[in-house]
Amino acid sequence: MVIDRELLKLVRKNIPSDFEARQLCEYLIKNGIEDKAEELSLKRKSGYPLQYILGEWDFFGRTFKVGEGVLIPRADTETLIETVLRADCKKSVICDLCSGSGCIAVTLEKETGAKVYAVEKSAKAFEFLKENVALNSSSVECVFGDIFDEGVKNSVPQSDIIVCNPPYLTSGDMNALQTEVSFEPREALFGGEDGLLFYRKVTSFWKEKINDGGYIFYEIGKGQEKQVSEILIENGFEDIKYQEDLCKIIRVVYARKK
Ligand SMILES: C[S@@+](CC[C@H](N)C(=O)[O-])C[C@H]1O[C@@H](n2cnc3c(N)ncnc32)[C@H](O)[C@@H]1O
């Protein structure tokens, strides 16, 4: 797309990143709202996430709608996808817990052809999940509710894989959030005092839903691998494996149910 020099100059006054400035210009041109250049670039300058301004973001080569109330899909989470795709295990039925925008569920369904279930409890996030399933012509089954509710668990069939990118920030992390992240929903970020609440509860509550020999895949926060592995072992999982992200941080822990 050709971007008018004056428009780019105006936006660059508030947005130093050339990549971001160009993304915003393209958005303004595409929607015929170049008159909002000043207003929206100032909004971005205040720390408001670019992704929320654009209303969509790409993940693993597909577009997902995003906005206030839903976590923005992260590049780190592509490591989780790649790990599941590479794993040598049965992938006919997959359940994605804490699904948010649905970026994991939709991507895994498209890439593996599995029957995929996606569970999300936030009403706002659930609207984005359904929208993204439709946008990507996906057949992911969306389940609205709390993953710790028996009824919700019973509505999902036995699975070969459970995949989960839960809230995993600690209390300390929450007090030191980057400005951009502070605009994202707290219930998508906070994983209890030590950040491990979801790993404990999900592992014990959901393990019965995994077929014998099936797998659980978790995205984790920096430095959580040892404690998450212990939780998995205590719950009868074996063959614990790690996968690093592009920054060499262990980002995924996965294990097989005995
Ligand atoms: C870290 S975000 C991950 C979103 C998405 N899977 C991704 O990777 O971008 C965690 C998600 O879990 C949801 N969540 C938190 N507690 C939940 C619960 N008890 N039951 C279902 N979903 C929950 C939040 O609303 C949020 O969408």
Image: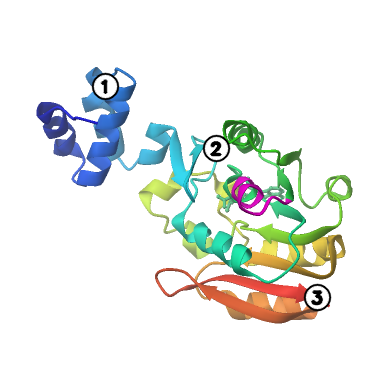
Compared across the picture, whether 232 is left or right of 178 comes to: right
Residue 69's disc number:
2
**Closer to the camera in the image, 193 or 154:** 154
| Residue that carries the numbered disc 3 in the rendered image | 235
Residue occupying image coordinates x 63% and y 61%? 192
Mark 3 closeness class: few <14, some 14–19, many ≥20 residues within 10 Å? some
Compared across the picture, whether 46 is left or right of 108 comes to: left
- Magenta highlight range: 106-114
Q: Is residue 83 something that shows in the picture?
A: yes
Quarter of the image where the N terminus is located: top left
Q: CA distance from mark 3 to mark 1?
A: 54 Å
Mark 2 CB near ligand 1 (8 Å cut): no
| Residue that carries the numbered disc 1 in the rendered image | 36
Where is residue 41 drawn, in percent x and y?
25, 33
Where is residue 108 drawn, in percent x and y?
63, 52
Compared across the picture, whether 53 is left or right of 199 comes to: left
Q: Secondary structure at mark 1?
A: helix
Q: CA distance from mark 2 to mark 3?
A: 33 Å
Where is residue 129 drawn, in percent x and y?
62, 37
Residue 89 inside the magenta-drawn segment: no
Majority secondary structure of magenta residues? helix
Going by the numbered disc 2, the residue's amino acid type is: Gly
Where, by quadrant of the figure, is residue 171 drawn?
A: bottom right
